[in-house]
Amino acid sequence: MGRVLIIGAGGVGNVVAHKCAMAPQIFEHICLASRTKSKCDAIAADVKAVTGRDIETAQVDADNVAETVSLIKHQKPDLLLNVALPYQDLHLMDACLETGIDYLDTANYEPIDEAKFEYSWQWAYHDRFKDAGLMALLGSGFDPGVTNVYCAYAAKHLFDAIHTVDIVDCNGGDHGKAFATNFNPEINIREITQRGRYFEDGQWHETDPLSVHQTFDFPGVGPREMYLLFHEEMESLVKHIPGIQRMRFWMTFGQEYLTHLRVLQNVGMTRIDPVMYEGREVVPIQFLKALLPDPGTLGENYEGLTCIGCVIEGVKNGEHRRVFIYNNCDHAVCWKEVKAQAVSYTTGVPAMIGAKMMMTNTWRGEGVFNMEQLDPDPFMEDLNEHGLPWQVLDWPESVK
C-alpha cells in the first residue's frame, strides 16, 4: 500500500523494521537508515531471516536536513518514521516539510544542550504542516503513545468525566547486568535525573528528583517501588482531557540501579555540558553512553515482564469509577519474535501501528497531532493483534 522510511537503527528501530516487514499489505517498501549503515544491514539480515522480506538500507546523518531531503527524494516514501534521537526531531520535520511527506516519532524534541522536555517546539509546526496538507503524529511509542490512547479510550467508553490519571511504568525484568538502561542511556539518564513535575488543581508542581515514591502492586510483576517523574505525555493529556484535576507519571527503579546512578551523578558522569580533557571537549554523559551496554544487546537473556498502564478515576453514569488499563509484555517472548527486549518492543510496536493508521488513512488530519486527539478504537484493536494485548480492571485503590 505504501512506502516507509525508518530512521534510527537502535533497539526500537530493529523492532519497527521487523513489525513493518510482517505487514507487507501495508508497508510494501521499507528503507531503514541511520548514521551507521552497518547497523541497518545487520537488522535487514535479521528481518530477511525472520520474514523472508528484503528491506533497503541507507546511511544518513539525521542532523543534516539536506542529507535527509536527498534520501527522501531518492526513496520517495509516503511517511518518515523517526526512531532516532529526540534531538533530531525538528531536523526531520523540516525535511518532511521540504519534501512533502508525513512524519511520525516516538518521543518529543529535546535540545541537546539542555535537559528540557516539552512539546512547544513541535506544536509550533502545526500551521506549517496544515498549510502543506501533511500530518505529523507525535509520540507513537508506549509512554508517550499507548498511554495516551488508553486515556482516549477511557474517555470514549469508560467515563463521562475523567478526574485523575496516574501513568505507571514498571520493568519487572532482569537482564543480568550490574547497570544498564533499557533505552538510549543518554536520553534515559537525562530524563530521570531532572526535577519531577505533576499537574494538580490547575497548575504544575515540581519535586526534587526521585524524592516522591510509593509501592504499587503491578499485575504480573508484584509490588515495586515507583518514583514520580515528569513525562511528556502529561503535557498533551492535560491539554486535551477536559476538566482533568490531577495528572502524574511514575516509574519503577531498583535500589541497585539508583545506587549506581547516585554515584555517577556525584562524580559528574551524568553532566550534559562539555568538559575539557587532554585538550578536547568531552560531554561526560556521552562518554558514559559509550561505556554502558547497548540497550539493543540486552534482550537475549532478559527474563520477566513489564507492566505499563493508566490508573484512571472519574465518573460514569453519575457514579465514581476507577480502572486500570495496562499491558504486560514478556522480555523472553519479544526476543524469540524479533530479537529485542520488551522495552524496545513496547515502543516499536506502537510506532508501527501509528504508521499503519496514517498510511491506511484510518488516522488522517492536517497539522501536528498527539495520539489522544485521534480515534482510539482501531489503534486499541491493533495492539491486541500485533503483540501488546491490554486489559481493563476495576481497580481497588487510588494511587496515593
Image (tube, helix red, strand yellow):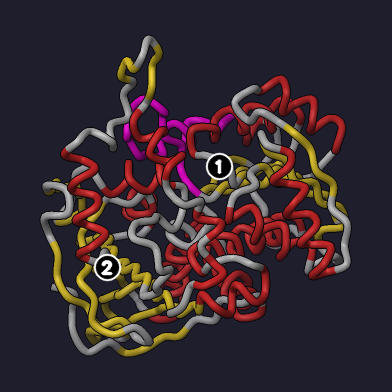
Q: Secondary structure at mark 1?
A: strand
Q: Residue furthest top?
A: 279
Whether the magenta-drawn stretch holds residue 281 is answered as no
The residue lying toward the viewer, choosing from 131 and 56, is 56
Q: Can residue 153 be seen at all in this image of the molecule?
A: yes
Q: Quadrant of the C terminus?
A: bottom left
User: What's the amino acid at mark 2?
Assistant: Asp
Q: Can residue 244 be seen at all in this image of the molecule?
A: no
Separation of residues labelled 2 and 1 (CA atoms) = 25 Å
Residue 371 locus on image (x, y percent) = 51, 57
Residue with the mark numbered 1: 368
Whether the magenta-drawn stretch holds residue 124 is answered as yes
Image height check: is 267 above or below 346? above
- Please give the range of residues in magenta: 107-128
- The answer to whether 132 appears left or right of 244 in the picture is right
Residue with the mark numbered 2: 166
- The answer to whether 191 appears left or right of 255 in the picture is right
Q: Residue at x 33, y 20 (%)?
A: 274
Residue 294 locus on image (x, y percent) = 51, 51
